[in-house]
Image (cartoon, helix red, strand yellow):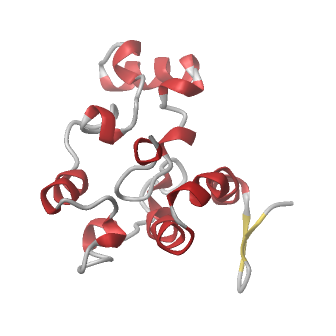
Amino acid sequence: MILNDISPCGLDCVNCEMHVDNNRTDVWEIMAKALGKTVEEMKCKGCREQNGCTVHDACATLECVQKKGLNFCSDCDEFPCTMLQPARDMADRLPHNFKVYNLCRIKRVGAEAFLKEAPGIRERYFKGKMTVGLGPVLD
């Protein structure tokens, strides 16, 4: 199901290194050691399917969307709220700063089309060089 591939906050779970389908044992081992968990506990199926992320214990954003009966934060009358506000803290390691962009794309093109775009969005985020007026550009 497409909804299980995208978190309610707009992260493309299916493209995350923690996702079980990506077979990133190297990443799972590093994260398991850092968090005091087993490698098996690090294999994420997506927050919708397992009611949260393997990296942290609870997610207020997921709980909020579930409580309101929505598919995505962008379906909410209060979008965007402070739970989606970006921060520079850990932006080099966590893709959370592009959630609002992703949610806007989902709202504009739909979840299925977004999933086709998501690998490119993720690549520009992590590997692109920010160019004023153009956004992240790949070399």
Q: Residue furthest front?
A: 1
Count numbered badges in the picture. 0
Q: Give percent across and percent down for residue 128.
A: 73, 61
Quadrant of the image containing the N terminus: top left
Write the residue at 71% across / 86% down.
133
State the residue in front, 18 or 70: 70
Write the residue at 32% across / 58% down.
71
State the residue in front, 57 or 35: 57
**Is residue 89 shown left or right of residue 54?**
right
Image vertical order of residue 129 relative to residue 66, above or below: below
Write the residue at 30% across / 19% down.
36
Q: Hey, which quadrant is residue 43 in on the image?
A: top left
- Is residue 53 visible in this depiction of the protein? no
**Is residue 73 shown left or right of residue 99?**
left
Q: Residue furthest right?
A: 139
Quadrant of the image containing the C terminus: bottom right
State the residue in front, 62 or 128: 62
Q: Hey, which quadrant is residue 24 in on the image?
A: top right
Q: Give percent across and percent down for residue 125.
A: 63, 59
Write the residue at 34% across / 62% down.
72
**Is residue 86 shown left or right of residue 113?**
left
Q: Give percent across and percent down for residue 14.
A: 52, 39
Q: Hey, which quadrant is residue 79 in on the image?
A: bottom left
Image vertical order of residue 35 relative to residue 81, above or below: above
Q: Give percent across and percent down for residue 8.
A: 34, 55
- Is residue 133 visible in this depiction of the protein? yes
Image vertical order of residue 68 relative to residue 7, above or below: below
Q: Residue furthest left?
A: 67
